[in-house]
Image (cartoon, helix red, strand yellow):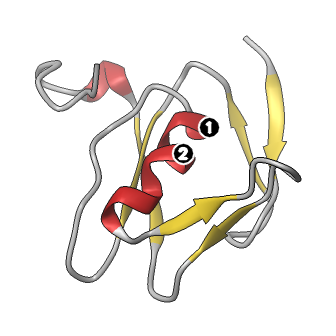
Amino acid sequence: MKFTAIRGTLGARDHWDGMCLYRFVTPHRIGKWYPDLLTAQRQAFAIGAGFLDERTGEFYAYKDTRLETQDPMMQDGAEGIAA
């Protein structure tokens, strides 16, 4: 596993790759769970949570958007994971 720092509008966060599921939540919509942050960021636009600037690699979250993480080992089943 690789230890990295996530930077962007949500601020710097430290995490262990492969240990979390990620999704973005807005006041009106909830995204699917994704196995990596980059995929969650790429899909955030679909629910109006923000957008990933592919040129710079920066993620820009819209107002009132939050990032949720979940440990996959604590999950009851895999039905919430996006394929």
Q: Secondary structure at mark 2?
A: helix
Q: Secondary structure at mark 1?
A: helix
Provide residue 61's location: percent of width, then percent of height.
Answer: 58, 73
What residue sits right under mark 2 in the picture?
42
Provide residue 25's location: percent of width, then percent of height.
Answer: 34, 66
Q: Residue furthest bottom?
A: 63
* Image: 65 above or below 56: below
Is there any visible trace of residue 66 in the rendered image? Answer: yes
Q: Residue 38's mark?
A: 1
Is there any visible trace of residue 68 in the rendered image? Answer: no
Q: Nearer the viewer, mark 2 or mark 1?
A: 2
Is residue 13 toward the left or the right of residue 50 in the image?
right
Quadrant location, the C terminus = top left
Return the residue nearer the eye: 70 or 42. Answer: 42
Give me the C-alpha separation between circle 2 and circle 1: 6 Å
Provide residue 32's location: percent of width, then percent of height.
Answer: 27, 43
Is residue 8 toward the left or the right of residue 25 in the image?
right
For label 2, the crowd category at 10 Å Cα-Cα, with few meaning under 14, some 14 to 19 and many 20 or more, is: some
**Residue sitting at x 22%, y 69%:** 29
Quadrant location, the N terminus = top right
For label 1, the crowd category at 10 Å Cα-Cα, with few meaning under 14, some 14 to 19 and many 20 or more, is: some
Provide residue 40's location: percent of width, then percent of height.
Answer: 48, 43
Q: Quadrant of residue 72?
A: top left
Is residue 13 toward the left or the right of residue 62 in the image?
right
**Residue sitting at x 67%, y 70%:** 60
Q: Amino acid at mark 1?
A: Leu
**Residue sitting at x 45%, y 25%:** 35
Q: Quadrant of residue 47?
A: bottom left
